[in-house]
Image: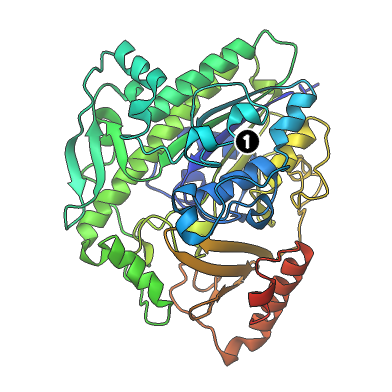
Amino acid sequence: MSAPIRNIMFFFGDQHRSDCLGCYGNEIVRTPTLDSLSETGTRFTRALSTSPVCTPARASVQTGLHAHDHGLQFNPEFARQLGGKMNVDCGTEFFAQRLRKHGWNLAHIGKWHIGDFRTELNRTLPANVGYDNDVYFPGYGYPMSAWLQHPDYLQYLKSLGVEDYELREPVNSPDGTRTYAAIAPGPKEASVPYYLATRTAEKIRSYAGSTAPFFISCNFWGPHQPVYLPEEAYRAYEGMDIPVWPNFNADLSARPTICRRWGEFWQMHRVSEELMSRLIGYHYAYITHIDECIGVVIDALKATGQLDETLVAYSADHGDSLGSMRMFDKGFGLYEFLVNIPMILWHHSFAAQVNDGSVSLLDLPATFLDVAGLEPSEKMPGRSLLPVARGEVEEIHEEIQVTMHYGHTQPARQIMARDRRWKLIFNLNAEHEFYDLRRDPHEMHNLYGPAFQPEIDRLRSAIREWNAACRNDYTIKWVELL
């Protein structure tokens, strides 16, 4: 008889588009650990970010609520200038609090980025919402200015003989104002991902003797740019002729003007295909290194005899432009490279499968509660993924998916509806967009217009129904403009 699910090990990436994994069809990037989990677990092909910016998405994973319900629509670094809130609405329950009440051990290690970036003003730090007081960074977590101020990481570096942290061979933007990638000092174990994996493995060992189940999340700052890796990891794809994305030089004339302006802000109109190829290679190196670090944690589960009774999950808060449509980072757009995220569930009892049903980040907290025998609250729209992973059902939601984007460094109000073929993007202050994902998976051609009116109307109705069902007062007025 197979061991039941007792524990949860959750890996959460930062800015990882789903087409940058081997198991999602990328034939260049090497991700053997995640590929192995996918091959013997459940891989979801239509997993959706609730809002493709760090804080809104991460708060949704922790609360099971849409951004308009938990209150954080922007990253806190830009919330004030965009008219948003700095902290989660008072009284909002985190799923960790419910697990803690039912006797679980909980650890959050790595990036948090929920609530005010000023720690003294943040009322929802991990230790305040059910987690142990472990190693985490409360805000954005930029490697140079953040983790190098973290005393535990500095001590960890010293244990590896790294006293002076100086980057080498930086790859800069054409105007020299930004660094895309550079070599960090020390062995590969000195990287932030490896450090987080090490601390996660230590936590697994510390919980091994407990009679209580555990939930541990390892939250990487990556593969978010810039790529700062020790040389062994950094050079993994150097010298390879890596093709740029098919939509790298997409015609943007039928898109909102902000698409082009966002790319210009990042100097992408001056980035050659040769440089873009190198940057994608460094991005792949980051992903491969994180995959290796996940393997370190999996090995700890095996060594402590806990792997067979542990649900292992991997996902990410949102995707990444990384040169698609001459854009960089995130910030504008509800395109597939930003909203379609990896999502993998593994337990040794699951049958291997690829599922194309409608799922989202909101289903993860419902799944975690289900492992504990708990139901999601009435306010949580997500549903447990366990029935799908166990092969009991094929879908848990309607086919049409809806998600919102509020903006990043500037307002960009958008709502998207998509099914397996069609996608409608409603832009409050710009041209609307409509794509045929089957014939045009890279969203090269905006088809919005009378020729596709029946499909546009069907997705428009879905947006209105979604907005009414989730009681989104924030958008109720401008959705009427659809």
Seen in the image, is 59 located left or right of residue 245?
Answer: right
How far across and down, in percent of the image, does residue 214 sit?
68, 22
The answer to whether one can see residue 30 in this image is no
Q: Name the residue under label 1.
A: 40
How far across and down, in percent of the image, does residue 141 sit?
41, 37
Kind of element beneath mark 1: loop
108 over 396 or under it: above or below: above
How far across and down, in percent of the image, does residue 479 sit?
66, 75
How far across and down, in percent of the image, does residue 382 sit?
74, 50
355 and 466: which one is in front? Answer: 466
116 over 154 or under it: above or below: below
Crowd band around label 1 with a 10 angstrom C-alpha radius: few (<14), some (14–19), many (20+): some
403 and 441: which one is in front? Answer: 403
The residue at the point 49 percent across, 58 percent down is 338
Q: What is the total number of numbered labels drawn onto the structure image? A: 1
* Quarter occupied by residue 442: bottom left
287 over 176 or under it: above or below: above
Q: In which quarter of the image is the N terminus?
A: top right
Q: Quadrant of the C terminus?
A: bottom right
Residue furthest bottom as drawn: 450
448 over 191 or under it: above or below: below
Seen in the image, is 451 located left or right of residue 235?
Answer: right
The residue at the point 39 percent across, 44 percent down is 29
Q: Look at label 1 and name its amino acid.
A: Thr
The way the protein has been coloured in the rendering is rainbow
270 and 249: which one is in front? Answer: 270
* Quarter occupied by residue 472: bottom right
Residue furthest front as drawn: 121
Seen in the image, is 476 located left or right of residue 340?
Answer: right
The answer to whether one can see residue 269 in this image is yes
The residue at the point 63 percent across, 45 percent down is 88
